[in-house]
């Protein structure tokens, strides 16, 4: 089975402000996050750097062939670093930029980044004001990664964007905020256009109180498949924040071990859909390496 992670994050350093609150990398995996010290990364990432090389080591161990790297305002703008990652590891990563104007979007495209990620759930402005950017992305065959909030008005705006840009490839993030009232409305956006997918980045975070093996997450995946079809759904880990609680492999093997999904459904969800949508090429074959403790 080819496994592809449709939602991950990388950064050289977190050093930004959001809504007047500080976000800053510290040591031993900790960060100041919204003025509070939290365990942002596993404690063995002692320098605060969330690098492509460490992620690749996790991917190889977990037999994950490729990963989509999105961005979030809470990590600061990582366009420069992700351009470096895309150029260094073109077969393993599909890196997205951050842009808030048409000129910035053009710069992202010219740098060789393959899409633009928008944390819509943190935006106060209307998504419709970004349509010139979305139109440009559509013309350049870039992918739009969009995480939405719980407001129905934003879902309606996203539907308008999809209708205005029918050829734009759109990935709705965080599995439609599966544990909130917005879940079904967000998932149903996949019916609004032929190029719209829903990825599950953060699903283990949203079901963190239940914890591994996340039986409610499995039920939600099955429910979403009933609404839009398993061919519109993709797995995402939300690496690295989620692996402060679980290992990277655990972020998907609760799916492979589930008796509630068929082998075909697992194959589609864990990699085949993402392989087609993001158009990965030359993914490596990653053999299983036996643990010393086995």
Image (tube, rainbow, N blue to C red):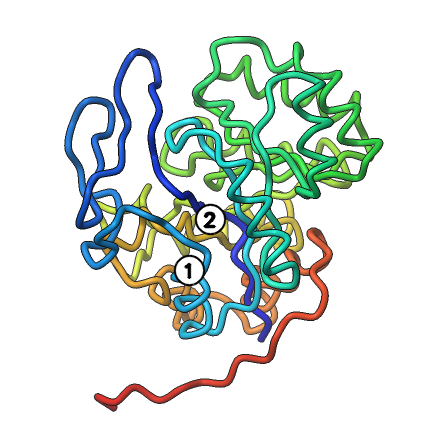
Q: Nearer the viewer, mark 2 or mark 1?
A: 1
**Quarter of the figure with the C terminus:** bottom left
The mark tally for this picture is 2
Secondary structure type for disc 1: helix
6 in relation to 81, above or below:
below
Q: Residues within 10 Å of mark 2 (few under 14, many from 20)?
A: many
What is the x, y in percent for residue 164?
Answer: 79, 21
Residue position marked by numbered label 1 in the rendering: 55
| Quadrant of image for the N terminus | bottom right
Residue 113 lies left or right of residue 6; in this view the side is: right
Q: Residue at image x 63%, y 22%?
A: 158
In the displayed structure, 115 sits above or below 94; it is above
Q: Mark 1, residues whose alpha carbon is within 10 Å: few (<14), some, or many (≥20)? A: some
Report how far apart the C-alphas of labels 2 and 1 lie in the structure. 9 Å
Residue drawn where x is 65% and y is 63% of the image: 91
Can you say whether 242 is above or below 101 in the image? below
Judging depth in this view, the residue of 129 and 186 nearest the camera is: 129
Q: What is the x, y in percent for residue 148? A: 50, 26
List the residue tagged with mark 2. 8
């Amino acid at each position: 089975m080819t496994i592809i992670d449709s939602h991950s994050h990388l950064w050289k350093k977190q050093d930004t402000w959001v809504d007047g609150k500080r976000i800053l990398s510290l040591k031993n995996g900790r960060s100041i996050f919204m003025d509070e010290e939290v365990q942002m990364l596993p404690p063995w990432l002692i320098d605060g750097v969330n690098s492509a090389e460490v992620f690749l080591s996790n991917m190889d161990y977990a037999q994950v062939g490729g990963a989509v790297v999105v961005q979030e305002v809470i990590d600061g703008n990582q366009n420069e670093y992700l351009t470096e990652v895309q150029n260094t590891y073109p077969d393993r990563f599909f890196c997205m930029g951050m842009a808030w104007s048409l000129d910035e979007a053009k710069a992202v495209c010219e740098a060789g980044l393959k899409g633009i990620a928008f944390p819509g759930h943190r935006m106060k402005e209307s998504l419709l004001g970004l349509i010139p950017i979305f139109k440009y992305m559509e013309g350049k065959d870039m992918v739009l990664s969009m995480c939405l909030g719980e407001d129905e008005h934003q879902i309606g705006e996203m539907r308008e964007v999809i209708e205005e840009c029918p050829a734009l490839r759109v990935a709705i993030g965080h599995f439609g905020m599966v544990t909130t009232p917005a879940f079904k409305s967000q998932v149903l956006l996949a019916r609004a256009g032929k190029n719209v997918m829903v990825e599950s980045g953060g699903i283990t975070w949203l079901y963190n109180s239940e914890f591994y093996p996340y039986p409610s997450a499995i039920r939600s995946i099955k429910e979403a498949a009933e609404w839009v079809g398993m061919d519109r759904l993709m797995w995402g880990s939300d690496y690295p924040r989620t692996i402060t609680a679980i290992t990277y492999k655990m972020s998907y093997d609760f799916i492979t071990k589930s008796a509630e999904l068929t082998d075909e459904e697992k194959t589609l969800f864990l990699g085949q859909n993402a392989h087609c949508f993001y158009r990965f090429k030359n993914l490596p074959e990653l053999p299983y390496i036996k643990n010393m403790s086995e």
